[in-house]
Image (cartoon, grey):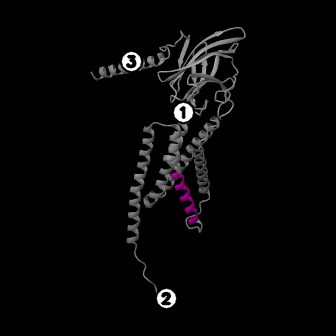
Amino acid sequence: MAARAALLILLAVLLFSGVVRGNAAGSCSSMSFPSNRVYAACSDLPRLSSSLHWTYEGGKGFGSLSFAFVAPPPSQSGWVSWAINPSGGGMIGCQALIAFRQPYGAMGVKTYNVTGYGPVSEGPIAYETSDLVAEFTGGAMRMFGKMKLPEGTTVVKQVWQVGAEVVDGVPQKHDFKPENLESMGTVDLLSGGISGAGSSASRNKNTHGILCAVSWGVLLPLGQIFARYLKTFKSADPAWFYLHISCQTLGYVIGVAGWATGLVLGNKSKGIVHTNHRNIGITLFTFCTLQVFALFLRPNKDHKYRLYWNIYHHSIGYSVIILSIVNIFKGMDILAVEQKWRTGYIVAICILGGVALILEIITWTIVLKRKSGKPKERPTFHV
């Protein structure tokens, strides 16, 4: 009976997911456009709730592309853009069409050759365009037009975007959320296949975040807990030292991998710099590297410089913990992670903090008992 119920639930879930996928896949095909505009193919783009509709006809010397791009702007005074980039996969080099409400009140489409990350300037693009019009209906902007492509063009690199504001007829910068940064890919004009660059970029960003959270945010604080509290117990010597070294070494290796992944992401995101997050990350890597080298220079317990080494080692260690936690939260803000991941990390930090507080009380109790139970030395007199 239980097996039959489980089977029915599984079938219901599969049926529901199939319906959802079917609805999602068919959303662009259910759209209708004015003026008898009908397109041979369409695809829901993977970012910004947008879709592309097109008809492509090859010809001698050039191909003719009739298209419609649909996307909801962040505000009624915003803008939407669709572009082809013949030179790369990012923003630089885009031959862009941007639709927004013109200063005289009506919707319109302008062309922009994007050559930098600053404000865009209207101008001619590399492709001949015609019949460019736009409308704003149902909370979405619709941009229509025709474009001539070089002969033999079947796959193009597309970039699409939305922005919240237009000032004096100039579209202002868009948000830098993951959806905005990953709204690019390719479209096969013949087969209708769409590929997005967002999947690999998101995977790299998530990998960077997980590696850094586990290393700087969990393993290094755990290693410091072993070093500070377990060595109070005589029976834990020298086990506490090996636990401490193991956690710190593993945390350093994983942290360096996360740091390197961050450098790769930074190099790929030209013009997008998270200055504070980057600088704290470099500082963490430097401090942890110094700690590794300091291990090889550690003097013996009875050495006259051991006190100064301890002060240095502990100061750098606590600084790393504080900076790590701050930078992990900054990284979560950059990635715009769901609240459940933020809550999960807060819970993990609270657990480590609670364990540290309990062990702090226990160790101080042991230390004070040892001091109170230690016999006092009798004074000696010398004649």
331 and 113: which one is in front? 113
| Residue with the mark numbered 3 | 15
Q: Of callouts 1 and 2, which one flags the residue occurring earlier in the amino acid sequence?
A: 1
204 in the magenta segment: no
Q: Main secondary structure of the magenta part?
A: helix
Q: Could you give the CA–CA distance between mark 1 and mark 2, rounded to whole angstroms? A: 80 Å
Q: Is residue 83 left or right of residue 383?
A: right
Q: Badge 2, how many Cα within 10 Å: few under 14, some, many 20+?
A: few
Q: Please, what secondary structure does the residue beneath circle 1 have?
A: helix
User: Where residue 267 sits in the image (x, y, percent)?
Assistant: 65, 37
Q: Residue at x 55, y 32 (%)?
A: 165
Give the vertical position of 314 relative to 185 (above or below): below
Q: Which residues are magenta?
A: 306-322
Secondary structure state at the residue bearing disc 2: loop
Query: What's the CA distance linking mark 2 and mark 3?
Result: 97 Å
User: Which residue is the extreme one toward the bottom?
Assistant: 383
Looking at numbered disc 2 in the image, what kind of residue is underneath it?
A: His
Residue at point 40% right, 63% down?
364
Q: Earlier in the sequence, mark 2 or mark 3?
A: 3
Q: In the visual, does 197 lie left or right of 236?
A: right
Choose mark 2 or mark 3, whichever is in front.
Answer: 3
Q: Secondary structure at mark 3?
A: helix
Amino acid type, callout 3 = Leu
Quick check: 162 above or below 318? above
Mark 3, Cα crowd under 10 Å, few <14 / some 14-19 / many 20+, is: few
Residue 344 x %, y %:
43, 41
- Picture quadrant of residue 97: top right
Which labelled disc corresponds to residue 382?
Answer: 2
Foreground disc of the pair 1, 2: 1
Question: Which circle marks residue 178 in the picture?
Answer: 1
Q: Calculate the distance from the C-alpha at mark 1 to the C-alpha at mark 3.
A: 31 Å
